[in-house]
Image (spheres, rainbow, N blue to C red):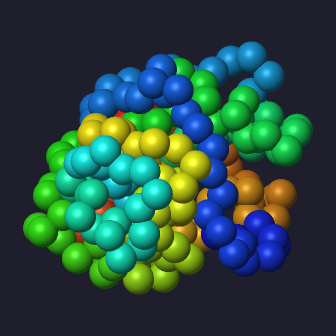
């Protein structure tokens, strides 16, 4: 994903917050934002569910703080995302963080080796494996816990593979529109499906 954006490989995770109003459930309709919206797209991601109070956790300790994993779609509006150095406005519309359909406990899957894919109206847009992630879930948790106290039930999106529209030439960019169905799928966890309306 960093390569297709033509940005340097980061040495630390890029962190931004999404408010609770971003959450949407599996099967829930996602309200397509109208105002100033031109470039809405998907980002299939492995999501960590925090199981214990976590503050200043080391990468070695981090697996003990992970309750489990679910599937997420970090929906983004690229124009607003890059209008400033703060990504908040492009990432934080209502329902821009669908998650589900299940949470699997950390002992049920190998988070470092899971196939991940995203489809829009059945067309595969992203396909990768979590072993290719720049930062492991444990590394993301440890990094965030140095700055933000994590509580049970908090969730961390861990990054998306290549295949997003922002990384394609303009003539190949097909942004999401009302009526589109997005499916984010992670091996051993399930398929998250949402329709934009």
Front-most of residues 157 and 57: 57
Residue 33, percent across and down? 63, 21
Residue 4, percent across and down? 73, 72
Residue, x 26% and y 58% (percent of image)? Answer: 66
Pick out the residue farthest to the front: 56
Residue, x 28% and y 68% (percent of image)? Answer: 63
Pick out the residue farthest to the top: 35
Q: Up-down: is 197 above or below 169?
A: above
Residue 126, percent across and down? 50, 66
Residue, x 22% and y 56% (percent of image)? Answer: 68
Q: Which quadrant: the N terminus?
A: bottom right
| Res 85 → quadrant | top right
Residue 129, percent across and down? 40, 78
Front-most of residues 49 and 98: 49
Q: Report the number of numbered marks.
A: 0
One can see residue 74 in this view: yes
Residue, x 66% and y 58% (percent of image)? Answer: 14
31 sits left or right of 106 in the view: right
Q: Up-down: is 113 above or below 54?
A: below
One can see residue 119 in this view: no
15 sits left or right of 112 in the view: right
């Amino acid at each position: 994903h960093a390569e297709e954006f033509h940005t340097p490989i980061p040495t630390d995770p890029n962190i931004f917050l999404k408010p609770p109003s971003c959450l949407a459930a599996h099967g829930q309709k996602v309200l397509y934002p109208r105002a100033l919206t031109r470039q809405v797209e998907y980002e299939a991601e492995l999501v960590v569910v925090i199981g214990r109070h976590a503050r200043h956790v080391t990468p070695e300790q981090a697996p003990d703080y992970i309750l489990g994993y679910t599937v997420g779609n970090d929906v983004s509006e690229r124009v607003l995302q890059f209008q400033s150095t703060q990504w908040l406005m492009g990432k934080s519309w209502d329902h821009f963080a669908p998650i589900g359909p299940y949470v699997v406990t950390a002992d049920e899957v190998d988070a470092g080796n899971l196939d991940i894919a995203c489809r829009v109206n059945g067309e595969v847009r992203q396909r990768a494996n979590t072993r290719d992630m720049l930062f492991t879930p444990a590394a993301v948790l440890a990094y965030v816990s140095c700055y933000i106290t994590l509580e049970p039930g908090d969730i961390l999106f861990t990054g998306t593979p290549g295949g997003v529209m922002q990384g394609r030439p303009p003539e190949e960019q097909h942004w999401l529109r009302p009526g589109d169905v997005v499916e984010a799928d992670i091996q051993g966890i399930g398929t998250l499906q949402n329709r934009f309306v």
